[in-house]
Structure formats: structure tokens, C-alpha cells
Image (cartoon, grey):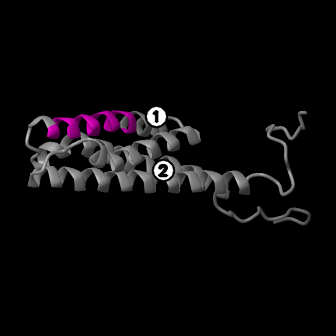
Amino acid sequence: MTRGQSSPPPEAGPPPRKLARGLRNEPISGLMLLASLWLFVGAWIIGYPFTEPAVDAHTVEILIGIVVFCVALARLIRPRGRVSDVLVLAGGVLLIVAPFVVSYGDTAAADAARVNDITVGCVLVVLAVVSLAIALTASRTGRPTGSRSASPRGRRHP
């Protein structure tokens, strides 16, 4: 190096906000996608009886699976806001509540359906809460302390 030239700054890695956004959109969205696919095929793998109560359980699973699948796919294609997390959270809560609201029947297969719905619902709730926490943490670390401006350019609007 000649005199007056400085060495390039050391690589510090990706900024925390970018790292959080990547973690939130790829691994968590991938797990959401897997959970939705399980909701589509779980009934056949577990072996639900196709009686009326089991069909009601599977209908709930399919509807929530479609919503979660679309949200997860959209998150993988293009980063989404917190609304996607709220939708997945609502789907998870609905899966947890469904066995108590919709009659699944009183067979061993119906018990398996209940356990399946509660388990997948808990997984979806945890994924949505973790994703929301990452989004909130990233938004706090990306904003200067004391800044109240919501504008990306830092201008305050009344």
C-alpha cells in the first residue's frame, strides 16, 4: 500500500435487520409450508375414518392448510409484513380450538385427529409468534433511538 491509502474496512457480516428478515422469510416460511402440506396429507397417513365427524375435522384441516400454504408460499416468493404472521397465528389457534368445537367423534382415529390438530396448531402458533418477535425486534433495531418517524426518509408527518 502506498502512503495515504487506507485498508478496506473489515467485513462485519449482514446487518441485524437483514439477517432477521432472511431468518423470518426462509426457514420459518419453509416450516409453515411443511406444516400446511402435512395438513393436506395427514388424514390419510394417520388413517382418519371417513365418517361425518372425521370429514368435518379434515375439512377444517384442509381450509387452514390452504390458507397457511398460500401465506407461506407468498412469504417465500416475496417478503411479507406482519399480517401473514397474524393469519398463520389465527389458523393455528383455530386448529387448537377445532377439536373442542367441532365433534370429531369418539373413536381412536378421532383421538388421533384431535392430537394431530392440536399439535399442528401449536406448531403454527409458535412459528407465527417467533416470526412476529423477529419482525418486531428487527424493526426496533433498524430504527434510530428516539425516532418517532414512520417515514423511510426520516421526515416527520403530523
Q: Is residue 123 left or right of residue 135?
A: left
Q: CA distance from mark 1 to mark 2?
A: 15 Å
Of the numbered discs 1 and 2, the one sitting upstream in the chain is 1
Callout 1 amino acid: Ala
Which residue position holds label 1?
74
What is the x, y in percent for residue 104? 19, 44
Tell me the number on the disc at residue 97: none
Query: Magenta span covers which residues?
Result: 53-68
Q: Quadrant of residue 122?
A: bottom left
Q: Which residue is mark 2?
A: 128
Residue 140 painted magenta = no
Asked which secondary structure carries label 1, the reply is helix
Residue drawn at x 90%, y 38% as measured from the top left: 156
Local secondary structure at mark 2: helix
Whole-percent x, y for residue 37 in the image: 27, 42
Q: Nearer the viewer, mark 1 or mark 2?
A: 2
Give the residue displayed 33% in from the left and 33% down from the top.
66
Quadrant of the rendering where the C terminus is positioned? top right
Q: Is residue 66 magenta?
A: yes
Residue density around tag 1, few if under 14, some if 14–19, many if 20 or more, within 10 Å:
some
Instruction: Give the quadrant of residue 49.
Output: top left
What residue is rendered at 16% in x and 54% in y? 112
54 vs 71, left or right, is left
- The reply to whether residue 27 is in sight is no
- For the N terminus, the image quarter is bottom right
**With 79 as the anchor, is 29 left or right in this view?**
left
- The kind of residue on which mark 2 rests is Ala
Q: Nearer the viewer, residue 6 or 47?
A: 47
Viewer-closest of 92 and 80: 92
Q: Is residue 69 above or below residue 135?
A: above
